[in-house]
Every structure is written in C-alpha cells, then in structure tokens.
Image (cartoon, coloured by chain):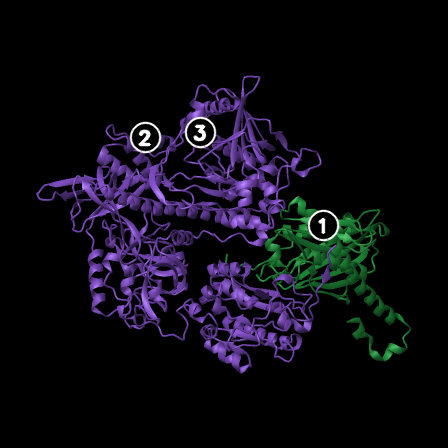
Chain colours: A green, B purple
Amino acid sequence: MGSRIEILNEAGFRSDGRRQFELRDLTIDLAKHGEADGSALISHGLTQVLVSVYGPREAKMRSHTFHDRANINVEVVVASFSTGERRKRQRGDKRVLEFAATIKSTFEPVIRTNLYPRSQIDIYVQVLQQDGSTLQTCINAATLALMNAGIPMTDFVCAVTGGVHSTSPMLDLSTLEENDIPHVTVAVMPKTKKVVLVTMETRLHVDRFEEILNLARDAGAILHQEMKEAILARSATLVALAEPVTKNQNKGDDDVVMD
Amino acid sequence: MVEITIRKRPRSEAVVTQRKFFKKTARGKVIKVLRERYLRDDVGCGIQSCQECTESCTPQANHLVMSGPDHGLFPDGHFLLPDTNVFLSQMDLLESPLFRPPIILLQTVIEEVRHRSLPLYNRLKALMAMDEKSIWVFYNEYRSETAVIREENETPNDRNDRGIRKAAAWYTTHLNTNVRGKAPKKPPTIVLLTEDAANRQKAEKDGLVTLSVRKYVEAMNDASQLLDLLASESEEIEPTRAASGKQFLYDEYLPSATLIGGVKAGQLHQGHFNANQYNYLEGSVSVPAFSKPVLLIGRENMNRATNGDIVVVEVFPEDEWKAPADEVVDQDSTLKNDDVESGDEDDGEDLVARVESKVVEYEKRDAEKQPTGKVVGVIKRLWRPYVCHIDSTSLTSSNATSLSVQTVFATPVSRLLPRIRMRTRQAPSLIGQKILVSIDRWDVTSRYPEGHFVRALGKVESKEAEQESLLLEFDVPYRPFGKAILDCLPKEGEQWVVPQKSDASPEWRDRQDLRDLNICSIDPPGCQDIDDALHARLLPNGNIEAGVHIADVSHFVHADTPMDNEAASRGTTVYLVDKRIDMLPALLGTNLCSLRPFVERLAFSAIWEMTPDADIVNVRFTKSVIASKAAFTYEEAQIRKDDANQKDALTEGIRLLNTIAIKLKAKRMAAGALNLASPEVKIHLDSSESSDPIDVEQKEMRETNSLVEEFMLLANISVAQKIQETFPQTAVLRRHMPPPKTNFEKLQDILMKRKGLALDVSSSGALAASLDKCLDPTEPAFNTLVRIMATRCMLSAEYFCSGSVARDTFGHYGLASPIYTHFTSPIRRYADVLAHRQLSAAIGYSPLHPSLHSKPHVERILGVVNKRHRMAQMAGRASVEFYVGLALKGREERVQKSGAGAVTEEAFVIRTFRNGLGVFVSSLGIEGLVMFKKDLQFDAENYTLSIPKPGSADLVAISVFDKVTVRIEVEKDKNTQRGRVKMTLLSPVDSKDM
C-alpha cells in the first residue's frame, strides 16, 4: 500500500515525531469528581481515562463479600465517542468484561484487602478517548484513584505498552502503531520491581520478548516518578487546606479543590 | 540501558500538535481521526559547519558540505532545497552523476513523492542511498519551527508548498546565525528549486532565493550535457509543434472516481496491458471477468496505453467482438513516412491513417472471437527509461551537423513499445548509438508519447553497449558493490581458510567433519561458483549413503546486513553469454563459498540413507566441513564413469550415484513428472578475452547432467518438507501451478488437425504420457518441438511463503512433487539463502532471524525475488539471441568466402499468419519470421498457407509442423541500426522475391 505510514523511519522518528523510547505526554488530574472517594483523570497522549473509586464500603449484595478480605469490583465503560468510529459497547460485552477482569487481577495482589474484611472496593473505569495503550492508561489511572481514595496499597502499579517494529523495540504505542506491530502491556511495582501483569494479544517472537519486558520495566520506573510527584503535589494542597483556617481564608478554598 | 523519557506536549500548542481529519472507510462510513504530533528542537539541519545542530545530526558521515564556487549564480556556495515537482518530473537529472550539489530533502517532499508515485519514490530511495550524492533528509514536520498545519480552505498541495517555503526560510535564518562563510564572506545561500511558477512567486515575496530547474541548470558548468536530461514538461519550452496541434487523436481518460466505481460495479475491467509483439496495432488485457483476454484493436482503442500499464477497459457489446489479427504488422515498415515535426493534420498522417485502417480491418471468424474493447483510463503507468535508437530518417538532413534543438523519433529496442518523440541538441552525435529515453507524457493530441534523453550507452552492436542495454531493459541491478557491502566480507579476504579443528573455534561449532569423504563436484565447463558437491558410499548394512553438500553461504551472509539487503534486492545472479552479474561479491561467490577442489570449505549437507532400490530410509541435515576431491565437468565425469578400467573410490562413488539417480528419475516419472524441453544452445566463444562468438550448437544432455539434477531435486524436496514442518507460516517454498486447460486449446487443436494426435491435459501424468506418444516416425525432432510448444502453454514456477497460500496449492506441477523449494544454489539465488537460514534454525544450529518469522516480510522479499528471477531469465535469453545473431553473421561471412552462398538451416513451422510463417530453427534455438509481401491464400482453420510456386500456377501448402529449409541472413535495419535475423524460405518454395 502506497499511503501506508512508516512506523519508524530511517532517522529513528515514529509517525508522531517521537523517538523509539519516548513516552507520550502524560497529564494527571487528581481533583475530586462528584461523590467518589477518590478519582483520577489521566491521559497518555490522546488516550484519556477517568477512574472513580468508591469504598471500602459495605457490599450491596451479601453474597459478594469475603469474610477475611475486601472484594474488589471493577466496572469498565468505554464511551461510544472514544474512538473515531462511533461504537456502542454493551455492558455485557465480552471484551469489556475481560478488560475489567484484567484490571481486577492486577490490583488484587497490590491492594491490602485483608484490612477490610466483608467490604467492597468499587473501581469504575471510564474510557473517554482512545488512541492506543488503553489498558496501560486504565491501570495507571486506577493506581492514582486508589491512592487518592486513601486505600492502602503495597506499592504503585505502573503500566507501559511496548512493541517491536521489525527488530527495534518502542514504547507507549498509539493506535496506528498498535494496529501494525506486536505489543505487550506490562505492569510493574516500581519499588520491588515485581511484575504484576503481562498481557499480549499478538504474536511476538520469544527472542524479542525479554528485551521488551526489561524496557517496559524501566519505563515503569520513569512513569512512577511522574505519578509520585502528582500524588505528592495533591497531598501538599490538601495539607495546606487542612491547616487551621487563617491565612488561606480569603482566597476561597473551592478553587483550590478544583485544582 | 537506553534513556527513556516522557515527551511533553503543552496543551497550548494543541492547534499545531493535534490533527483532525475525516476518513471514509471501504464501506462508506465516515470516521473522525485524531492524531497527535510531537514537535521537537533536536531535528538536525545536517550542515557540517553548523554549530547548533552538531549533536542532533546523526549519522555524521552524511553531513552536507557547502558546494564549491562552481555554480555561476552562487559563488559563495549554496544548498539546494528542491520542491516535490522537481522529483516528480526531473528524476533523471537528479540521478545523473554530473549533478551533485548538496541537496536538502524535506520530509514533506518525500511523503508527497510517495503519495504521488511509488516507482519514483523507490528511485528517490535509491538516490538517497547512493554514495556519491550528498543528500540530507530534514524532518521538517517534526521540528517546532517548521511544522505547518493545514488551514481552512487550503488544499493539501498548498499546505505542502507552504511547508516547503517555511523550511527554506528557516534554513536561511538558521544558516545566517550558525554558519559563517569563510571570513568576511556571506553565508551560503539556500536555493528553493521548484517548477511551479506560483510557488516561486510566493517564495520571492517571502524573500527566498528561488529558481526553476532549467534556470539553475543553465548556469551550471556542465549545462550542455545536463540540459538534455530535463523532462520535456518544463513550462519554459514550448511544446513541439505536433503536440500543440488542436486535433484530438485519442479520447480523454475518464475521471479516476468513475474508473474505480465502474470497476467495482463490473461495467469496466481492470488489468495489465499487453502489447502484441507481432502487431503494433493490437494489444490485449487479461481481466478476471472473461476467460479470454480483452482485445484492443487499433490505436484509438489502445488509447495511449503502453506495455505493462495497469489500465481500465470498457468491453464492447458482443456483436462487435473480433478475432485477433492473423497478420504481421511491423511499425517500422508501416510508418516509414511519418514525420516527427509535422502536425497530425498533414498528408503524411493521412497516409498513415489509411494504412492503419486497412490493417485494422478484419475478416470475421466467429470461432476465434474474443471480447473486444477500448482503454478508458490508466490506473498506473509503468514507465521507466527505455533503451532506444534514434531513427535517422526523422532527422532533417539540413541540420545533421548543427547543435540546435531538434525533434526526433526514438525507436525502442523492445517491439512492444511505440516510438517516442523527443527533443535533443545532440541528435547527430546520437545516431548509431544506443540511448536511454524516458517517457514524460502522452497527450490526446499527440500520436506518440513525448520523452527526453537520459544518457547514451555506446555504439550500436558494440558488446558493452548491447550488454548494458540488455541489463537496463530487464531492470537488472548491475552497479558494482558499494563499500558498506564489501565491509561485510571476512577481513582475511582471499586468505580466509577454515581454521584448525578445535572446540573453541566458532566455525567448528556443531559442524560435522566430512573431510575424509570422497566428495566431488560436477558442473558445466568453466564454472567458477560451485554451489554443490556430491558423494555416495556403501554402508555395511547393504544400504547406500548419499550426500549433497551445498556451499554454506548463510555462514558468511548474515541477515539484515548491507550485503544481505543488496543480495535480497538483486535476487539472483544473472548469466549473460560473456558476463555474469553476481548476487554476492565475487570473493564469496567464486572463492570462499565455492566448493573448490583440494581446499576445505564450509558446507550445509543433506545426507540420506537409501536402500539399493533408492527408497529413503532416513535423511539428516548438518552443517559440515568438506574437502572436495575433484571438480569434474559433466563430460569428464561421464567419461570416467564409462571407463571400466577406472576402479578408484571416486569413480565408484559416481557410479553409485548414477545408479540411484536412474532409479530416482524412474520413480519421479512414474509419479507423473514432465519431461520438458526448452531450446537451449551453447555459444562457442573465440577466447575468454575477445569473447567473439564462433559458433552455436545445441546443448548436449549427458547422463551426468541428469545425475546431478536428480540429487538436487531430492535435496530440495527433503529440505522443503523439513522447513515447512518447522515453520508452517513462513517457510520459503517454490511451486508450479497446474496450467489452466484453456492454455492448451490451440496446441491440442493444431495437433489434432495436423497430425491426428490427441493431447490429454487432465493431469501432469496424463500430459507426460500423451507427450510421449507424440511421435512422428519420420521426424525424430518432432517430439522435442511439441514439448517446447507445450512448455510455452504452462505457467511459470514461483516462490511463495507457505503461510500465504492454501496448503493444497503447494504442489509443483512439472516435477509432480507435493512440495518443493530451492536450496541447492545459495551463491546465485537469494531464495536458497533464506531456505538455508530456515533449515539452519530447523536443525537448531542457529536462531532464526526475527524478519524470517514475519509473513509480510517474507512475502515482500519473495515478490522481489520472483520478479528478478523472471527478468534474469529473459535477460539471459536475450543475450543468447544477440550472440546467436553475431555468430550467424560470422558464419555467413565464412560461408560466403567459401562460395556456398548463404547460411541455410532446417526449421519447423510453428505458427502461420496471413502473410508469414513463424518458424523455429532448433539447431540454433531461435525463432524467426518468414514474411511475404503479398497476401496469400490462408486457411486459418487448418493452419495452412498456400504459396504459389514461382513460374507455375501450382500452390504449395505449408502448415504448422511442416519442415522447411530457410535461408538465414543478418541484416541491419536501416532506420534503427538494429541487427536482426531475417529468414527467407528456400524449400519447398524459394521466397526470395516474394
């Protein structure tokens, strides 16, 4: 095909002007959204996800609880306007359910569920815009929302998508790249360097796999820096607000909450 | 560890960094696409003395050095920044070795070229890779200062032009601040080169230096030679008088949307245009909708299509369908009086039109009617430079010595192409030379396409020029290997040897030591690149061990190196009569890889254990080290085998191999393999230096030829099974599709009518059996002739990737093998190199390169290899034809000296026309045409032509398969300087005066 876009050109630029190991622009918004106990709106490039966390709270249905730990409930909604082609995904859509299950199993070992027996933690994921690496964005957003809600976790979970074009690996893929090259999504806990999730839907050669896995782990550490800063900044504003109401009075605190 | 960073993209810049557009899908749905773009400051300008960009410019080696003061307009030095249209129309100029100013190539330009024309894009890529050109690619769309965004109501074209101007402006200021000329001098100039006058105006308004290509070239030192390379499209020169004539000769093409819509709806049909080599006024297009190709009769219906173009045709209603002409129409003789310069309204043209209309009239033969139609559009032109001669009659005699511009006809060497009208200043000096000409355009008002001169190849009939023209005509890459490629060779060069056997040396890892075996190679005489060697011995258990040892090319040629890429693009070694164009550098092909006798060489061996009845007990593949004991020619091996006194181990080995080969062949034949024939001749050269052909003789087939062939087939089949098992998705295989039955219809009909023989084409076995029955007791060569004709009805074999086609189409029809590949000649075929790599991975010797796991990658490579393979075959045949011509000329002179008159040969009639006979001279392996000036009595149904005997009213009937005697002369065509074989009938009727 003539008009095909080059994934990686000879000078080492990708189709959007990034180089191989450059991640897309990351923006994090930890402001409170509505009733949620904690929420995060984050975007990797043009992929944007809003996660709201409720809980730990009493489960609606008794049968869903465990006597020794909290139940994690993940629900994913993919907005029909999130891709170029309008497409309505039903709640029972297999793809979406699988997606939710993946997120759930990622966080189960990280959240200290044993502290909250017989309760439930709800993670509502809303995919607002998609441009590749959706799972990565969902996981990163969920990590931040859980922290924002004050739920105890053993570590951050930072996810990165890596792919390989012919023999050159690259990180944080856009839709264009995802459609064309084999890719893996890896989620790591940066402190312990443990890998909590590796998922792959395309075929990737074994020899390349190790290289990408290592790269994605390193990239996770970079993301960790950025996410940590965002959490610290958020905490700092909250701490400032919690100070005795003296100097900040006249500024009007609503603005600050809205970031 | 690599550095991983997060690229920031400020929201405030979203207007520039985000792109939104709507796209229509194949189903007609409209989707919105949003893409982002990261703008950066580290995109290098590529100029050597730039202080700012030194770090971001990689690779350093490609840096541009400011041009010297040799250009008249820019004594302070300059850099060229060409616009897209320069590459679209003036590629020949840019490719010329004389044109070498430093060029800044913008990303926008590359993308636009790619979008507009893929062949030009490929040429541009090749241009960028050339060592002697200095070209720097500047990624202007990624640099924050030069990125542009399409504005409202702006066409993509305007956007690109604006982007190019912006980049030029940026370069100008960038140079001003960062690059100083020598001491007080001004910094070098950035010259925006564009053919678009509107763009030039706008650029001048912005204060940029801008020129048209013609103006730029005129001020260069080599102007006179370079000016001819300019395409005739430049707006500065007036179109030739004929082209500006108002009369429309052709219909305009339909708009492309209509074409695509029509093809989709089934009203129009798309296919490749094939010109008819016997009749320049006829062409055909094979389309899927009809079993027979669509016939296009006459210039108007062919509507400016040239051979190979992808065209769209409209088919006429069935009552207007016609049969293909049964006459030979030669452009050269029909159009002798056509004047180049004169307009199409002249008398001369009327004459042409009258002659043509006469030719185009057809008698209606219902049986052979074919769908008939006309070309209504061209999807893709397949224009490339063509090898031509200047038609000397088209020169006006008055200015035969002047250097003024004149318009002349260039006649392509290939009979499939129309002549090309071109303007040149060097016309007189180009007469008698072979030249390259590119077609630029073909207007509705012009009978012929317009083109321009690219370069001269040399004197007609000089071997160098003929050789080069052959290579160009068949698109064979023949440039010497570049430095990057030669760097991939082992450092030791000629001195490289297999190291001493030890566990530490990488060469000996997992290699079997077969140096003690009595291995020998059998090849044609003078063979330098010995791919294969053989051995056989008796095992204690009564079985036989036979081994085929193939040069271990994959040990030297590693995947994804410059040498590998070059070999992949060359695809195959091309053998011309007196020259070989190698796929791999000669050091490997003729020395390090070649399995020469008495030296140790690395090999890839396939070793079978067989029962005495040639049933395979087992097979194993291993990398090995061998030492060949002898290199025989087929003849030597044959003599040795037949000499009962020779009792040494080597000879016994050959005898053993031979007995197995005979059994293997019998088995293959029983399975239904075809015994095909192609006219193969051998050219005797005077000596290797002078390479003057002395004579031609038919190639002899010996028992030993068949011996080697059988073992190579066996090795290929065994390897094919192994790699297909291990890599079911990407194995490199070769197949030969069974031909459609309709291909044989004509041959069956001729055989039935002329000889009363039936040809059963239901399967390859049936065909083989019925070919065996095609015997004429009085004529032993008849069977060979039928085999040759049957071979021409078949499809050609092709390489394919096992994952891309259905499993049941893997079969090889000719060999009657369910699976096949090429493994045995890695020195001269690239597919074999791939097969070696896959087999090496299959036996666990080395990991498979990731590219060989990717189906699209393998498919792409094999596509190229298939094309090269076809072209190489045609080039080889054309080369033989040229030498046969030379040899005939030599023989003619000798015969005349001895007073015998002329060269005569026996020939078979293979085709009949209304005014001629197609004959095949088997002793020379050439086909020729016997033409008669007047129309004769022709019976198309029975393929019979009746010729009156001179001096009597009797008619002599000549039909297909009849044996005739022809007189062969080599005459020089007056117009084109093309030497060609002319045949006249000698017996049963002397047609000299007919």
Image-based side of B572 in relation to B412, left or right: right
The tally of labels here is: 3
Residue nearest the viewer, comparing B357 with B918: B918
Residue nearest the viewer, comparing B917 with B397: B397
Q: Quadrant of the rendered structure where residue B143 is? A: bottom right
- At label 1, the amino acid type is Leu
Q: Report which residue position mark 2 lands on.
A: B770
Q: Secondary structure at mark 1?
A: helix
What residue is shown at x 85% (from left), y 52% (from top)?
A116
Q: Position of residue B615 (x, y in %)?
A: 50, 23
Q: Quadrant of the rendered structure where residue A145 is? A: bottom right
- Nearer the observer: mark 2 or 1; the answer is 2
The alpha-carbon separation of the residues under discs 2 and 1 comes to 63 Å
As displayed, is residue B710 above or below residue A195?
above
- At label 3, the amino acid type is Glu
Residue nearest the viewer, comparing B268 with B837: B837
Residue nearest the viewer, comparing B765 with B962: B962
Q: Quadrant of the rendered structure where residue B785 is? A: top left
The alpha-carbon separation of the residues under discs 1 and 3 comes to 60 Å
> Chain under label 3?
B
Q: Secondary structure at mark 3?
A: helix
Q: Position of residue B142 (x, y in %)?
A: 62, 67
Image-based side of B705 in relation to B852, left or right: left
Q: Report which residue position mark 3 lands on.
A: B636
- At label 2, the amino acid type is Ser
Counting residues from the start of the chain, the first of labels 3 and 2 encountered is 3
Image-based side of B460 in relation to A188, left or right: left
Residue B911, can we see it?
Answer: no
